[in-house]
Image (cartoon, rainbow, N blue to C red):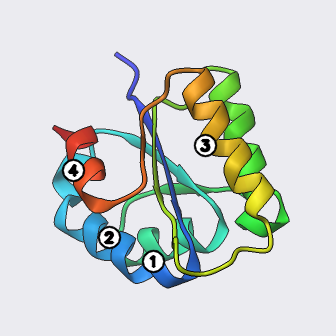
Amino acid sequence: MEKKVIALIAHDGKKDEIVRWALKNKEKLKNYELCGTGHTAQRVSEATGLEVKGFLAGPLGGDQQIGAHVAEGKIDAIVFLCDPLTAQPHDPDVRALLRIAVVYDVPIATNISTADCILK
């Protein structure tokens, strides 16, 4: 049976939070194939020892790469800890990813509570 794929994304102000979440859920995350945008994938992989396939950084097209994988049916869920209090220069890309997740009915967690629900 193929492992389900979870994409991990976090804005700069949320990277420590996604690392803490991944450490807390390391045993559960071992059951998934993981991918993520540049620095988030690197930080989670280094902290947990889990393999996390890295895409480009979000502002450099990583959000769009993950969106393309969603459209191709290659991603089953997304954990995207976005920082609602900080303006993002690539906000149109962020909104496009959120939209594509809705269009393709892919669960997308934007905070720790919903990320926990995805793993249950």
Q: 10 Å neighbourhood of mark 4: few (<14), some, or many (≥20)?
A: few
| Label 2 to label 4: alpha-carbon separation | 17 Å
3 above or below 119?
above
| Label 3 to label 4: alpha-carbon separation | 18 Å
**Mark 3–mark 1 contact, CB under 8 Å?**
no
Please name the residue that numbered disc 4 is placed on.
116
Please name the residue that numbered disc 2 is placed on.
48
Q: 10 Å neighbourhood of mark 2: few (<14), some, or many (≥20)?
A: some
Q: Nearer the viewer, mark 3 or mark 4?
A: 3
Q: Nearer the viewer, mark 2 or mark 4?
A: 4
- Residue drawn at x 75%, y 34% as measured from the top left: 68
Q: Position of residue 58 (x, y in %)?
A: 72, 64
Name the kind of residue labelled 3 in the image: Leu
Q: Secondary structure at mark 4?
A: helix
98 above or below 113?
above
Please name the residue that numbered disc 3 is placed on.
98
- Residue drawn at x 69%, y 21% as measured from the top left: 72
- Residue drawn at x 66%, y 67% as measured from the top left: 38
Q: Nearer the viewer, mark 2 or mark 3?
A: 3
Q: Nearer the viewer, mark 1 or mark 2?
A: 1
Which of the labelled discs sits on residue 14, or is there none? 1
The answer to whether residue 3 is left or right of residue 120 is: right
Q: Earlier in the sequence, mark 2 or mark 3?
A: 2
Q: Secondary structure at mark 1?
A: helix
Which of the labelled discs sits on residue 102, or is there none? none
Name the kind of residue labelled 1 in the image: Lys
Q: Position of residue 4 (x, y in %)?
A: 40, 29
